[in-house]
Image: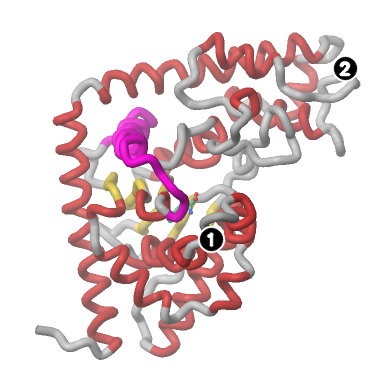
Amino acid sequence: MINDKKIIFSGIQPSGNLTIGNYLGALKNFSEYIDNYKCFYCIVDEHAITVRQVPADLRRRSYEMMALYMACGLDPTNENVTLYVQSHVPAHAELAWILNCFTGFGELSRMTQFKDKSAKHADNINAGLFTYPALMAADILLYQTDIVPVGIDQKQHVELTRDIANRFNQLYPDTFTIPEPVMKKTGAKIMSLADPTKKMSKSDENQNAVVYILDDKDTIIRKFKRAVTDSDTCVRVAEGKDGINNLISIYSCFTGKTDEEIEREFEGRGYGDFKLAVGEACADALAPVQAEFKRIMSDKAQLEQFMKNGADEAAYYARKTLSKVRRKLGFVQI
Ligand code: TRP
């Protein structure tokens, strides 16, 4: 607990332009917690380097991520909100090493993200990619986190974090709080517009498969128009209609309407009408975020100041947990 509040931690990698999947599955929901929880939202640049990054892009995206967090309603001057960059707080890397020693080779081998990423980057299957979940566990456990809002694809990593924490606590009682993953029912997994059986991914090479948070209105509408659907014409949720199911779920996330309301709204109208409506709802919802993002990005000195303050605050709490861990392990305190 911090200031009598339970603790939330989540992180996003600055490794690509963020998509509406990131927005609906994570970012948009982050602000819902700020009145009732102490929230740490991290830009996980150390996770990003498990695959090769262009340095200038990584740097720019880290700033952009910070601005996007703020544009999505996370005010760094609010005492419940801490926004910062992972590499600014050395405790993450330090605890990650320690947790590596409490994580099984077999456990890491079973992580689906590792299997996917090592297939995708077969020329660079490095140890960091493999031990990625130990760093993620360090992120979460450093802050004595109660709740971790994540997309469904990260659930397995949070479960491993719980296993690591329980194992550590068994050997060294009362060290870590055991975190709980929370996922949104819809919006937890937005699928690709080109292949709706695949997750929408910011690293997809097909630009039409992905809608980015910062895409302009025309681009958004064009991408939805081209979205792959099926030969049916009726806007209805159904088994096997992956494309339409995905569009209904996106429309529902942006408008707050239920599936039944959406089916009624588009009764007797074709896919064309529906796709246009999805595009417009998406563009309208993103417009204020984009305007705020532009405003924040125009004052880099201010943005950097917020990053510094966030890192100082995060480091204060992280250090407390790390010293406890070091003491329990038997490292000499000097
Ligand atoms: N692994 C997460 C992802 O790729 C990012 C992440 C890193 C994270 N550390 C975290 C998410 C801690 C939640 C909590 O999306």
Question: Foreground: 30 or 66?
Answer: 66
As measured in the structure, the alpha-carbon distance from the residue carrying label 1 to the one carrying label 2 is 44 Å
Q: How is the image coloured?
A: secondary structure
Residue 5 magenta-drawn?
no
In the rendered view, does 275 fall on the left or right side of 10?
right
Respond yes or no on whether mark 1 lies under 8 Å from ligand 1.
no
Which residue does the numbered mark 1 point to in the structure image?
125
Q: Quadrant of residue 274?
A: top right
Which residue does the numbered mark 2 point to in the structure image?
233
Magenta region, main secondary structure? helix
Within 10 Å of disc 2 (Cα), the crowding (few <14, some 14-19, many 20+) is: few
- Residue positioned 60% across, 77% down in the render: 106
Residue 62 magenta-drawn?
yes
The residue segment tinted magenta is 50-75
Q: Residue lying farthest right? A: 232
- Residue positioned 63% across, 60% down in the render: 115
Q: Quadrant of residue 265?
A: top right
In the rendered view, does 74 fall on the left or right side of 284?
left
Q: Position of residue 16 (x, y in %)?
A: 46, 37
Q: Residue lying farthest front? A: 123
Q: Position of residue 11 (x, y in %)?
A: 41, 49
Q: Quadrant of residue 220?
A: top right
Q: Is 199 drawn above or below residue 72 in the view shown?
A: below
Disc 2 residue type (three-letter): Thr
In the rendered view, does 124 fall on the left or right side of 67?
right
Label 1 SS: loop
